[in-house]
Amino acid sequence: MLVRPCYSLGCAWSRVALLRTREDLPDGGALGDRRLALKAVAGASYTFDVGNGLTVIGEYHYSGFGLRDVDELAPGGLDARETERFIARMTRGDSQILGRHALGVQFSYPVDDRGAASLLVLASPRDGSGLISPGMHWNVGSSASFRVNTFIPWGAGPEDARPGSEYGATPMSLTAQLSIHF
């Protein structure tokens, strides 16, 4: 289900999906069925009349594929088969977040007609960890673009094979991407 009322400068949306899996979910299911996973996204955006236009997007994500508590990944949290299933589910992209809840805010600003700057903040409302990602995007002529982003996490790191937080073990990183369109 998709609900998306849009206005001239702003937009709100929500998506809800109920998915049935082949096997029980490692951390329970939805509506009393261990094989049902609920996924939902709610968000809003608005472009402020500042300079070239500052766009702000905010979203909340809920994933029934995620863990109730990331400590369940520590030894003794999930049994070996459940851990294997959870990792397989993450690898194939069933869950984009480790836990069940995530908040995101993105700011973007067109610097000129060829480039834009952005700032993304992702956070776990459960443990307060998150990451901040400043980035730049440039259109290099009509057939190429270049993007660079850095990811700077915060939150408690792992200790004694036990995750300290959802984003605390995320490495600081820098990515660069050159795209050629033909």
Image (spheres, rainbow, N blue to C red):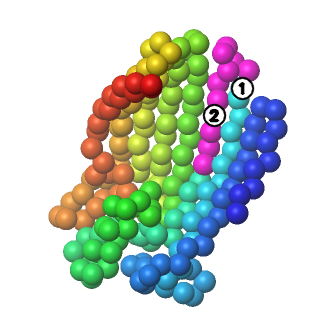
The 10 Å Cα crowd at callout 2, few under 14, some 14 to 19, many 20 or more, is some
Q: Is residue 16 left or right of residue 78?
A: right
The residue drawn where x is 62% and y is 67% is 17
Q: Decide whether residue 33 is among the magenta residues.
A: no
Residue 83: which quarter of the image? Answer: bottom left
Identify the residue position indicated by label 1 in the image. Answer: 48
Furthest residue toward front: 182
What's the residue type where badge 1 is placed?
Answer: Phe
The quadrant of the image that shows the N terminus is bottom right
Q: Is residue 154 left or right of residue 40?
A: left
Residue 159 visible somewhere in the drawing: yes
Residue at 28% x, 52% y: name it. 169
Q: Residue at x 81, y 32 (%)?
A: 8
Which region of the structure is painted magenta? 49-59
Up/down of 131 relative to 116, above or below: below
Q: CA distance from mark 2 to mark 1?
A: 8 Å
**Numbered label tally:** 2
Q: Quadrant of the C terminus?
A: top left
Residue on which the image places disc 2: 56
Mark 2 or 1 closer to N-term?
1
Q: Is residue 116 above or below residue 28?
A: above
For this orientation, the residue located farthest to the left is 160
Identify whether 107 is placed above or below 79: above
Three-letter residue code for mark 2: Val
CB atoms of marks 2 and 1 within 8 Å: yes
- The residue carrying pointer 1 sits among few (fewer than 14), some (14 to 19) or many (20 or more) residues within 10 Å by Cα, namely few
